[in-house]
Image: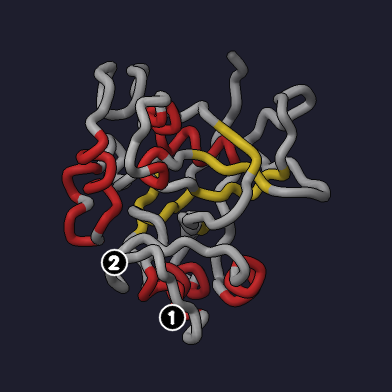
Amino acid sequence: MREVRVEPFMIARHPLTVAQVQHWLPEYEDSLADSVSGTARVEDDLDDLLGAWPFRLPSEAEWEYAARASTTTLTFRGDGKPDEDQVLDDFADEERTAAAENAFGLAAMGSANEICADVWIPHFKGAPADARPRTGDGPRVARGGAGDLHPWQGCDEWLLLLSATRFEMYGFTALRPVAPVPTGPGDVQTARATAALRVRAVP
């Protein structure tokens, strides 16, 4: 166990939908989503999207803090093993995510694999204690992804819902944008950037 200091930040209530990605990348298509209101999975378009949107990715520490939502149970849902159908419903459609909210009001945490700002390092030795992302060359860290393994094969796919589970990013990924908390009425850029998303301020 390690202790990390996390400052307040704003994070999207759910991962980006296909329609939201198309707001910045009009040519984006997603063959894995059932509708434009479903969770988008980005792969080849990732660098283009990160260059076009006015947000940043969460650090690993921020993502884990948001996923835990002040809970000490196995997952934010409690200590019970979650049902696969419930996990799939968590991010299948924007209109069906309300039941999946954690105590911070964030939906579908852990259902889709979500990319973080940190470069992948298989340990926390030397990691910052102030929630800054670790930088460098190579793939980034991903968190979550239990719903992306449908249908479950009985290989403990639900473990990807654990807030501390992490792995090296490969293939497609979901994204949950982060923005700074506005500091005053003059912070117009943040206000405009977050207008296109439903965001939650995380204490």
> Could you say where residue 41 lies in the image, as x and y percent from the top left?
47, 61
At a point 72% along the width and 29% down the height, the residue shown is: 122
Label 2: few (<14), some (14–19) or many (≥20) C-alpha neighbours in 10 Å: few
Residue lying farthest to the top in this orientation? 1
- Where is 152 relative to 124, above or below? below
Q: Quadrant of the C terminus?
A: top left
Relative depth, front residue between 115 and 83:
83
Amino acid found under the numbered disc labelled 1: His
Residue lying farthest to the bottom in this orientation? 26
Residue lying farthest to the right in this orientation? 137
At a point 65% along the width and 40% down the height, the residue shown is: 168
Callout in the foreground (1, 2): 2
Report the side of 2 relative to 103 (left or right): right
Q: Is residue 164 visible?
A: yes
Q: Secondary structure at mark 2?
A: loop
Q: What residue would you read off at disc 1?
A: 23
- Where is 148 relative to 123, above or below? below
- Where is 141 relative to 71, above or below? below
> Could you say where residue 196 lies in the image, as x and y percent from the top left?
37, 73
> Could you say where residue 3 lies in the image, as x and y percent from the top left?
59, 20
Q: What residue would you read off at disc 2?
A: 34
